[in-house]
Image (cartoon, rainbow, N blue to C red):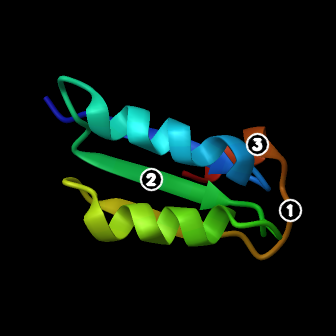
Amino acid sequence: MNLSIALATYNGAAYLKEQLESFAAQTRTPDELVISDDQSTDDTLRLIEEFAATARFPVRLSVNDQTWASLRTLKKL
C-alpha cells in the first residue's frame, strides 16, 4: 500500500518547517509528498525546496498560476 500526503500551501512559512519535519519523522514515512502552492510570497517555496533536497521520499511541488484557495488547490492534486 502506498502512502501519499497532499499539502496545499499559501504563505505558510511560519509553520511549514515544523510540519515538513513531522512528516519526515513519522515511523512510516510517506511514499511521496505532493504540494500545491498558491503563489506564496513568503519563504514557503524556499523551505519546500530545501526540504525536498534532503527528504527520504519524493516531493513534488506545483505552483498554481493564481491563488485558488485551499479546497480548489487540493482538488487539483
Could you say where residue 75 lies in the image, as x and y percent from the top left?
64, 44
Circle number at residue 67: 1
Write down the residue under mark 3: 70
**Callout 3, which amino acid?**
Ser
Residue extending furthest top?
27
Q: Residue at x 29, y 49 (%)?
A: 32
Q: Residues within 10 Å of mark 1 (few under 14, many from 20)?
A: some
Seen at 58% across and 72% down, the residue is: 46
- Callout 1: SS: loop
Residue 59 in sight in this render: yes
Q: Secondary structure at mark 3?
A: helix
Pointer 2: what residue? Answer: 34
Q: Mark 1 and mark 3: span between their CA atoms?
A: 9 Å
Q: Does 75 sit above or below residue 65?
A: above
Q: Is residue 26 above or below residue 37?
A: above
Mark 3 crowdedness (10 Å alpha carbons): few <14, some 14-19, many ≥20: some
- The amino acid type of the residue labelled 2 equals Val
Q: Earlier in the sequence, mark 2 or mark 1?
A: 2
**Could you say where residue 15 lies in the image, as x and y percent from the top left?**
67, 40
Q: Residue at x 28, y 32 (%)?
A: 25
Image quadrant where one finds the N terminus? top left
Badge 2: few (under 14), some or many (20 or more) residues near its Cα, within 10 Å? some
Residues 33 and 50: in front is 50
In the rendered image, which quarter is residue 74 located in?
top right
For the residues labelled 3 and 2, the Cα–Cα distance comes to: 14 Å
Q: Earlier in the sequence, mark 3 or mark 2?
A: 2
x, y percentage for residue 12? Answer: 73, 49
Q: CA distance from mark 2 to mark 1?
A: 17 Å
Amino acid, disc 1: Thr
Does any portion of residue 75 appear in the rendered image? no
